[in-house]
Image (cartoon, helix red, strand yellow):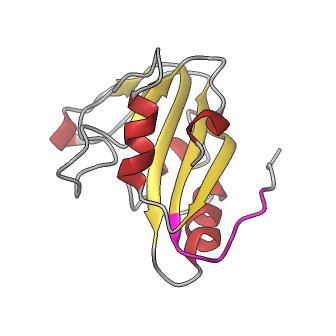
């Protein structure tokens, strides 16, 4: 069942809370083909192009899509795909700021260094593992 979100068309940053119900092997040779364990994850990204946050997050919410970014492995439909359980959009925000806020929360960890942050020199990862009771509003700005 698809969850609907009210997504702004402005540029900014976003956080996706993704639930994995089973192990997810990732075919990412550069990252040594890691496997994500079942649990909750938060991916932080940015949307600066046409359509802003609505277009980028809307793409992540679609199960059928080509794999373009690391996070697509988690959100694409299929046997092991995850479910986007919640979305936080921050108009004019920056993804690295969201990552820093997340890293300050107890129980948050980096499951795979470099995942989702191959173009970032500041963050260890843009995908973080979070506790099972995690709520995205804790990092809202």
Residue 63 seen from this side: no
Instruction: Give the percent coordinates (x, y) of residue 4.
Output: 81, 55
Quadrant of the rendering where the N terminus is positioned: top right
Q: Say whether residue 1 is left or right of residue 79.
A: right
Res. 43 visible in picture: yes
Q: Closer to the camera, 65 or 114?
A: 114
10 relative position to 73: left or right: right
Residue 126 vertical placement versus 103 (above, below):
below
Q: Would residue 8 be counted in the magenta stretch?
A: yes
Seen at 63% across and 37% down, the residue is: 136
> Which residue is situated farthest in the front direction here?
141
Taking the spot 34% from the left edge, 47% from the top edge, the residue there is 116
What span is colored magenta in the figure?
5-12
Residue located 65% across and 64% down the image:
58
**Of helix, strand and loop, which mostly describes the magenta segment?**
loop
Residue drawn at the location 22% of the way across and 58% of the way down: 119
Q: Position of residue 36 (x, y in %)?
A: 42, 25
Q: Position of residue 12 (x, y in %)?
A: 51, 67
- Asked if residue 7 is among those painted magenta in the image, a careful observer would answer yes
For residue 71, above or below residue 20 = below
Q: Is residue 104 left or right of residue 21?
A: left
Give the x, y percent position of residue 19: 62, 30
Answer above or below: position of 106 versus 77. Answer: above
């Amino acid at each position: 069942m698809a969850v609907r979100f009210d997504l702004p068309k402005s540029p900014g940053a976003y956080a996706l809370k993704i639930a994995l119900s089973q192990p997810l092997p990732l075919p990412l040779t550069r990252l040594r083909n890691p496997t994500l364990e079942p649990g909750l994850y938060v991916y932080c990204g940015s949307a600066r192009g046409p359509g802003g946050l609505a277009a980028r997050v809307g793409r992540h919410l679609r199960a059928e899509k080509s794999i373009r970014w690391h996070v697509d492995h988690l959100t694409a439909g299929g046997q092991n795909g995850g479910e986007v359980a919640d979305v936080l959009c921050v108009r004019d925000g920056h993804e690295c700021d969201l990552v820093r806020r997340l890293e300050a929360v107890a129980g948050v960890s980096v499951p795979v260094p470099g995942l989702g942050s191959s173009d970032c020199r500041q963050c260890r990862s843009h995908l973080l593992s979070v506790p099972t009771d995690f709520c995205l509003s804790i990092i809202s700005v």
